[in-house]
Amino acid sequence: MKKKIIIFLALLLVVGGLTGCSLPGKKKPKEESNTVTPAAPVILSESDLEGIADLSEVIFEEDKESLKVSDISEEKKGELARFLVKGKSWDEVTGKELTKLYQDHFGKDQTIEFQDIKCFMDHKNEEEQILYYYDKEQDKYVYNEKHPGHGGGGVEHIGSLKTFDSLEIDGTIYKYNMKILFYGKAWCYDTGGCEYGSGYKTYKDATEEKNALLNINDSKYMVDYYGPPSLEKEKLMNDYKNQLDTYQFVFEKIEGKLIFKEYKKI
């Protein structure tokens, strides 16, 4: 009988070792878990994505292939701050409010020296050229009553078309990639509509009018719905996307806000 009990206990120990069970009265030492709880996925809201796209459109300087937040000129700072104003005209917002809007998107350490806003069209003298004066005492923009208006003119310039390519998220860093097509020597009327000229891969090619990818005005992308001709931008960009350079706009999410850091051609 004693021999049978010993054999039974031996079998019990073996089974217990195989199954991970322990004998009554003995506690198995607690093992440290190697399991890592996965972090919650980073979700970019639609408003965040739209905000990145909108800021990317305005931040971009056509004649530069890279730009850090510290490189933004005072004139460009003012333009960006005014772009951020929603539901009000520029002369309804104080410089202090504009600065706060700018800091919310470009960093709390940023400052702005507000300057007069010039009309995009050429006028006879400097007094007429100013569209809005910046009044330091009132801390706001004031419309120039002597501005003569436009009268159906226009402006010749080099512009760009942009389309979203991809988004990379690395922790708090958001890298928003865009494809960019430049169009050169375009004439855009202040009453609406543009004559785009040709499309180019680089800003330099557009200024020198060489290595054109397509003639936008003579292509299937210009349509006329009983008014000024309009450009089917999405269709054009989809067709030429693979031939274009990619520009990356880098943002950091700080305290729930996307703060612009830099853009560069990659």
Image: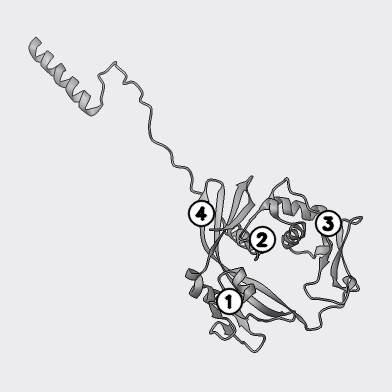
Residue 215 image offset from top left, x and y in percent = 57, 82
The type of residue carrying mark 1 is Lys
Q: Earlier in the sequence, mark 3 or mark 4?
A: 3
Cβ–Cβ below 8 Å for labels 3 and 4? no
Residue 135 image offset from top left, x and y in percent = 89, 59
Mark 2 vs mark 1, foreground winner is 1
The type of residue carrying mark 3 is Thr
- CA gap, disc 3 to disc 1? 45 Å
Q: Nearer the viewer, residue 91 or 206?
A: 206
Q: How many marks?
A: 4
- Residue at 66% x, 79% y is 186
Mark 1 vs mark 4, foreground winner is 1
- CA gap, disc 2 to disc 1? 26 Å
Give the residue pinned by disc 1. Answer: 210
Residue 68 image offset from top left, x and y in percent = 65, 53
Cβ–Cβ below 8 Å for labels 3 and 1? no
Q: Earlier in the sequence, mark 2 or mark 4?
A: 2
- CA gap, disc 3 to disc 4? 36 Å
Q: Earlier in the sequence, mark 3 or mark 2?
A: 2
Give the residue pinned by disc 3. Answer: 94
Q: Residues within 10 Å of mark 3 (few under 14, many from 20)?
A: some
Cβ–Cβ below 8 Å for labels 2 and 1? no
Cβ–Cβ below 8 Å for labels 3 and 2? no
Give the residue pinned by disc 4. Answer: 168
Q: Secondary structure at mark 1?
A: loop
- CA gap, disc 2 to disc 4? 19 Å
The type of residue carrying mark 2 is Ile
